[in-house]
Amino acid sequence: TRKSRPQRLLKAVEGKATLGDPQSVITAIDHFCRHKEWAMNVGDEKGSILDSLVIELSPVNVLELGTYCGYSTVRIARLLPPGARFITLEFNPDYAAVARQVIGWAGLEDKVQLVEGASGDWIPRLREHFGVQMFDLVFLDHWKDQYLPDTKQLEECGLIQKGTVLLADNVICPGTPDYLKYVRNSPHYDSRYYRSHLEYTKVEDGLEKSVFLGF
Ligand SMILES: O=C(NC/C=C/[C@H]1OC[C@H](O)[C@@H]1O)c1cc([N+](=O)[O-])cc(O)c1O
Ligand SMILES: [Mg+2]
């Protein structure tokens, strides 16, 4: 059967990138998505904003919701300090299989724990299963209607604490209206919008950064 788009994206990485070189993996994916086939990676423009926030925060415990092909996983993992812990959750096994290989090609497999399954099932188990107490950074990039319920569940599980930074992709396109309303109206979050564009297009989109202020 014909290969899937994630599999074709992986082929582009294997054909173009240098093994163990995260930047070459990022460049190969961006080239593939700009010139061959669009894919829902955070992309280079929003990716640069993501990079600067990761560098500024220098997070020790990171959670990513929605791995897809591992593009943002590689962007984040390549910037983490030694000893940092990075868990990325992906529901779709085919995406997860491609992401493992993309992360491996970047030489970052030792920095990332890719967990397959639904975020709603895994969030209550992260503490006892991975021994993580709280997250310094949560990157939300999975199903858009899951951002809000998963954020509330992370709060209830105590995995979001004072100072935790939530960074949400696609708050304009495809859009996450209920999540945006929540973080922007809640007295417990200090939220700001980083205006950008939907990956590889001229359509407006952006990242919302929300700092938890404590209860
Ligand atoms: O649905 C998006 N992401 C959620 C991904 C959902 C899939 O990955 C997690 C789960 O396995 C699901 O099958 C998305 C969609 C667009 N888009 O333009 O349609 C742009 C983006 O940056 C996106 O993250
Ligand atoms: Mg996205």
Image (tube, rainbow, N blue to C red):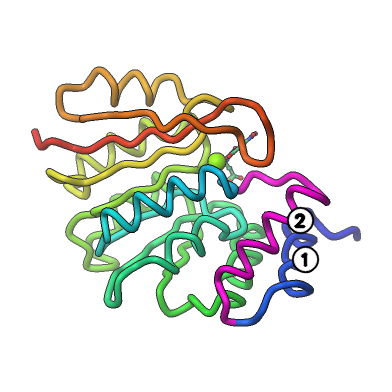
Label 1's element? helix
Label 2's element? helix
Tell me the residue at 21%/50% (across/down): 159
Given the current orientation, which residue lies at the most extreme right position?
A: 1
Seen from the viewer's position, the closer of residues 182 and 193 is 193
Tell me which segment is drawn in magenta. 20-41
On screen, residue 67 versus residue 119, left or right, reads: right
Q: Main secondary structure of the magenta part?
A: helix
On screen, residue 44 versus residue 130, left or right, reads: right
Say what amino acid the circle numbered 2 marks: Phe
Which label belongs to residue 32?
A: 2
Say whether disc 1 or disc 2 marks the residue closer to the N-terminus: 1
Residue 61 against residue 84 in the figure, above or below: above
Tell me the residue at 74%/60% (across/down): 9
- The image quarter in which residue 83 lies: bottom left
Residue placed under numbered mark 1 in the picture: 12
Q: Position of residue 187 (x, y in %)?
A: 15, 22
On screen, residue 171 versus residue 123, left or right, reads: right
